[in-house]
């Protein structure tokens, strides 16, 4: 017999719920990304705090105006960093953006140093125009090549932080092309070698170059710090100062030795080079991207020598491919393959350096054979500065004291391009697998205890109705678990300890909805309605409150997810997910199953049903009523 028109059909809603379960778990077991045995397919994607691994947070910085990068630049940087991480052969690495300036790299199950993947990798090829001592000693620039020791392949490795390397062509233009490194200046040279007639000499006023307003403001702050006398003396230098011949100048320039690397970075290029109290110790620690502008000259150090570098005429974008290889001597090298236009630029640069066109290279900057050197500059550091001994028309190599790891790391940075944004590592967290396993057990134990307490209270207070609560919580847990597995494969959602906390909080939200419904049901029975008619009436009235309460929780989770970062975002997502699925269970299981229970004899028993004193009170009222008929809704 069909139910009367307008009467609820609980079987239909339960069938819809069953269909949702079937579809969800078909996705769990057979969707894309599902592999391994049945047990493996049931494993959700767990965060680092539960399985161990490495997490690195990179913050975008801007040395000019401090503004956050654009969304497009941040996404481009994320993709490049992800390519670099994948080049390590790391499986299941996660690289995501957080907020408007952070990128978070997560490697589950592995502990390794990831700070290199955030380096800008701005590759520049710059001609060395001048060289001087960068140790801060009271000495003049290096002497002419006649005083330079011969027979060495590069600057003496006196404290260089980067691998000493030389650039050599695969197809050599001459038997020794590119295989010789330029000489570093000799700190003990005499003062007579001070250059002054070079075409690359500093401009009379170092502060006259156009600069962004914020940089100009920072320079004024530095000028106030060092004093007007020191600033005027430094601005008037046309070449590196010889402090041995003018002791008073040493006193004037002494305040520059107290500047921080950040303050040194905003000084004019010529001032950084000419002031001897500005040392390589300060220059090497300048913020990232301090010499990023390829259209400006730059100052950088190599092995304690301070170089004035020309504008960059070959960039990292001119490199088509970079790979780590073993050369004929079984040494690791980084092979560079240029693009079509890049090869033309490289050939033109080597021709210019080989012929020293316009006598741009000062005597202090020439190699042992009297040729210009070209510095290979990566970010703020000089990787190598080889003397160019021929016009190079083929590909080149960066060779030197590389091992397999460092050569592949440099090749990866160059191959995937320079980051459009400069990053500073903020925090690297290493979690061991043992600690992650203990976190997981503690989280599951807390969730189990919370669920058990709710169930115990439900059976104690609501008795038969407690079984509805128990079944609802079990179904909610199964829905949440299946959703976690599917979301982990489809959008990369990882369950963290904070996410488990969000699900535990959702248990309280679910318990509130039970209390609202059941207490409303008791009120309807006390008002004189039969249990069977009170169920739909109580549902209509409690439904609004339940939806409102869950909607507020859901909105809170959404707002928290939008404005937060890190673990708090995982908490918000888990709380919102569990709240939505709880609403599904409320509409498709709880109300239908209550409608079915209302038709049973046990539901009419106060001792069994858990309705407590509501049923006896209703019986007493109906017995004393003048009209014995039961009030129906």
Image (cartoon, grey):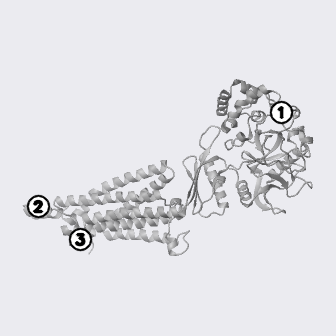
Residue highlighted by disc 3: 599
Q: Nearer the viewer, residue 279 or 427?
A: 279
* 556 up-or-down from 66: above or below: below
Say whether disc 3 or disc 1 marks the residue closer to the N-terminus: 1
How far is mark 2 from mark 3, CA to CA?
Answer: 22 Å
Say whether disc 1 or disc 2 marks the residue closer to the N-terminus: 1
How far is mark 1 from mark 2, CA to CA?
Answer: 107 Å
Residue at the (21%, 64%) spot, across then down: 611
Q: Is residue 6 visible?
A: no
Quadrant of the rendered image containing residue 574: bottom left
Residue 82: % across, % down = 63, 57
**Disc 3, SS:** loop
**Circles 3 and 1: CB distance less than 8 Å?**
no
Quadrant of the rendered image containing residue 18: bottom left
**Disc 2, SS:** helix
Q: Nearer the viewer, residue 239 or 608?
A: 239
Q: Residues within 10 Å of mark 2 (few under 14, many from 20)?
A: some
Which residue of the protein is positioned furthest toward the top in this rendering? 229
How far is mark 3 from mark 1, CA to CA?
Answer: 99 Å
Q: Nearer the viewer, residue 325 or 247?
A: 247
Residue highlighted by disc 1: 201
* Side (left or right) of 276 relative to 73: right
* Side (left or right) of 423 relative to 43: right
Residue highlighted by disc 2: 621
Q: Nearer the viewer, residue 211 or 16?
A: 211
- What is the count of numbered marks? 3
**Disc 1, SS:** loop
């Amino acid at each position: 017999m069909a139910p009367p028109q307008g009467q609820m059909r609980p079987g239909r809603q339960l069938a819809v719920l069953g269909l949702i379960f079937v579809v969800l778990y078909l996705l769990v077991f057979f969707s894309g990304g599902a592999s391994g045995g049945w047990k493996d397919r049931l494993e959700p994607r767990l965060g680092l705090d539960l399985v161990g691994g490495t997490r690195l947070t990179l913050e975008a910085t801007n040395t000019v105006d401090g503004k956050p990068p654009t969304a497009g630049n941040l996404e481009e940087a994320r993709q490049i960093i992800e390519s670099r991480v994948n080049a390590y052969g790391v499986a299941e690495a996660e690289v995501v953006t957080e907020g408007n300036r952070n990128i978070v790299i997560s490697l589950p199950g592995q502990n390794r140093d990831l700070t290199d993947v955030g380096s800008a990798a701005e590759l520049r090829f710059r001609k060395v125009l001048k060289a001087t001592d960068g140790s801060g000693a009271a000495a003049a620039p290096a002497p002419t090549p006649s005083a330079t020791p011969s027979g060495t392949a590069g600057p003496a490795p006196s404290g260089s932080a980067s691998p000493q390397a030389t650039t050599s062509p695969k197809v050599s233009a001459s038997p020794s092309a590119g295989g010789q490194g330029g000489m570093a200046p000799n700190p003990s040279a005499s003062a007579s070698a001070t250059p002054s007639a070079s075409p690359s000499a500093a401009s009379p006023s170092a502060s006259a170059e156009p600069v962004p307003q914020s940089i100009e403001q920072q320079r004024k702050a530095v000028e106030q710090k060092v004093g007007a006398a020191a600033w005027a003396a430094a601005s008037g230098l046309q070449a590196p100062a010889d402090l041995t011949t003018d002791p008073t100048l040493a006193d004037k320039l002494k305040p520059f030795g107290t500047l921080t690397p950040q303050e040194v970075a905003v000084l004019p290029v010529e001032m950084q080079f000419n002031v001897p109290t500005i040392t390589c110790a300060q220059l090497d620690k300048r913020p990232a991207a301090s010499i990023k502008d390829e259209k400006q000259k730059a100052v950088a150090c190599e092995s304690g020598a301070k170089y004035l570098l020309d504008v960059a005429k070959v960039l990292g974008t001119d490199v088509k491919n970079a790979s780590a290889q073993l050369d004929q001597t079984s040494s690791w090298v980084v092979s560079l393959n240029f693009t079509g236009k890049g090869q033309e630029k490289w050939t033109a640069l080597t021709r210019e350096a080989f012929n020293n066109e316009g006598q741009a290279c000062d005597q202090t900057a020439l190699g042992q054979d009297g040729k210009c050197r070209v510095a290979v500059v990566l970010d703020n550091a000089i990787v190598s500065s080889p003397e160019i001994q021929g016009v190079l028309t083929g590909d080149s190599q960066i060779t030197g004291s590389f091992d397999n790891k460092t050569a592949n790391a440099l090749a990866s940075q160059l191959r995937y391009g320079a980051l459009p944004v400069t990053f500073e590592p903020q925090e690297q967290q290493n979690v061991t697998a043992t600690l992650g396993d203990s976190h997981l057990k503690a989280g599951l134990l807390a969730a189990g205890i919370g669920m058990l307490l709710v169930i115990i209270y439900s059976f104690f207070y609501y008795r038969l109705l407690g079984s509805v609560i128990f079944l609802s919580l079990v179904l909610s847990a199964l829905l949440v678990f299946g959703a976690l597995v599917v979301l982990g494969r489809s959008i990369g959602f990882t369950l963290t300890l904070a996410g488990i906390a969000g699900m535990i909080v959702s248990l309280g939200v679910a318990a509130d909805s039970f209390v609202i419904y059941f207490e409303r049901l008791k009120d309807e029975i006390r008002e004189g309605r039969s249990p069977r008619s009170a169920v739909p009436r109580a549902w209509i009235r409690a439904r609004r409150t339940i939806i409102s309460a869950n909607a507020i929780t859901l909105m809170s989770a959404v707002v928290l997810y939008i404005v937060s970062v890190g673990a708090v975002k995982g908490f918000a997502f888990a709380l919102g997910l569990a709240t939505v699925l709880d609403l599904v269970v409320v509409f498709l299981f709880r109300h239908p199953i209550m409608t079915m229970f209302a038709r049973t004899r046990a539901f009419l028993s106060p001792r069994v049903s858990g309705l407590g004193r509501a049923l006896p009170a209703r019986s007493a009222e109906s017995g004393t009523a003048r009209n014995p008929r039961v009030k129906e809704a």
